[in-house]
Amino acid sequence: MTPDLPIEIPSPLPGGAPLRLRHRLPHVWTQRAAADRRPFGLYWSDRDGLGRLFPEPGADELTRFYDTTSYAAYMGERAGGGAGASPAPTARPTPTTRVLRRIAAAFERSEPLTPARVHRLVDGKPARVCDLGCGAGELLLGLRALGHDVLGVDPNPTAIATGQRTGLRVLPGTAEDLPADCPRAAFDVVVMSHSLEHCRDPLRALRHAHSLVRPGGRLVCDVPNHASAGFACSGPSWFHTDAGRHLWFFTPQSLRAMAAATGWTVDGFEFDGFARQFDWLAKEQEVWDALYGDGAGGGSPPPRPSVGMQVRLLGKALLGGAAVRHDAVRLLASRR
């Protein structure tokens, strides 16, 4: 049986509502060794649109959560070979999900985070850009090709080596623990692309990002969008939940609150990723099976992802707005 977890935990937001236990996790889904497993909870505040994993994993546990073949391949891939928070699923969709995907594609209004998008944010002028959590460095390579002065920060040794092989300057560190030689108040743009959800302390990370930009500088922060119909339908099995490697779960509402609490002026939001969610069924079933398939967690697990669940996803998404439809949200903010 899963040991008891607290019913609620405090919010990190000033004046925020407590986060209440929403999903019980017998362990983190990437853990294979039974001796390493322990239970966690996914806690959530409906009022603030914010969630977190609790208890907070230890440093050694986090290392094991990331110790998978697919994650190592993503960090060591040839830069320019593809971006994203996680490796793309490879299983072929069913005939029904292919139909659902085509319908979703007709309503796709995504704005992917590309070098061209960042280039437009600075009106096509040469800029200094820092990417916190740069991974293999694809975005930085594209920005460098457009004439920008770029710097990456990442804690993963494979990612650092991958970036450096392409001539990028990549410093070891994180948004919470900035490298000492990362210049402050010097950048026109700081990018955090699918990195904030990995941080232990997202408020500290955003304050540090604020310290890096000059007055008038911009923040571009992409995270999985937990206001989406995908999370509402699939919960802890949703492809972008990835609880364990992801420690915090955001919506536009909670991103706005965190940005305001750390000195940023919010300029707006952009959204990305609708049709691709219909490629994820096999991966979400794999996550569910890893978490709940052996029945060892006790209690009543959430439903296993299915084609029927994807039909419900399409219906919820089409009835909602952009924040319900898309799987990723991008905060655009400025330092005034």
Image (cartoon, rainbow, N blue to C red):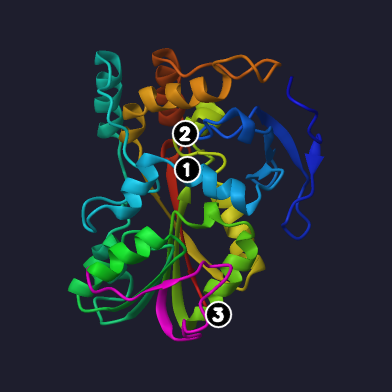
Q: Which residues are magenta?
A: 166-189
Q: Residues within 10 Å of mark 1 (few under 14, many from 20)?
A: many
Residue 198 location (% of width, % of height): 53, 53
Residue 38 location (% of width, % of height): 68, 33
Nearest to N terminus: mark 1 or mark 3: 3
Q: Are marks 1 and 3 in contact (CB under 8 Å)?
A: no
Residue picked out by circle 2: 320
Residue 248 visible = no
Q: Amino acid at mark 2?
A: Gly
Q: Residues within 10 Å of mark 3 (few under 14, many from 20)?
A: some
Residue lying farthest to the left in this orientation: 145
Residue 211 shows which numbered tag?
A: 3
Residue 132 against residue 280 in the figure, above or below? below
The prevailing secondary structure element of the residues shown in magenta is: loop
Q: Is residue 78 left or right of residue 50?
A: left
Front-most of residues 298 and 11: 298
The part of the image, by quadrant, that contains residue 91 is top left
Kindly report the distance in space between the C-alpha atoms of the residues bearing marks 2 and 3. Answer: 36 Å
Residue located 51% across and 26% down the image: 234
Whether residue 35 is in magenta: the answer is: no
Front-most of residues 158 and 133: 158
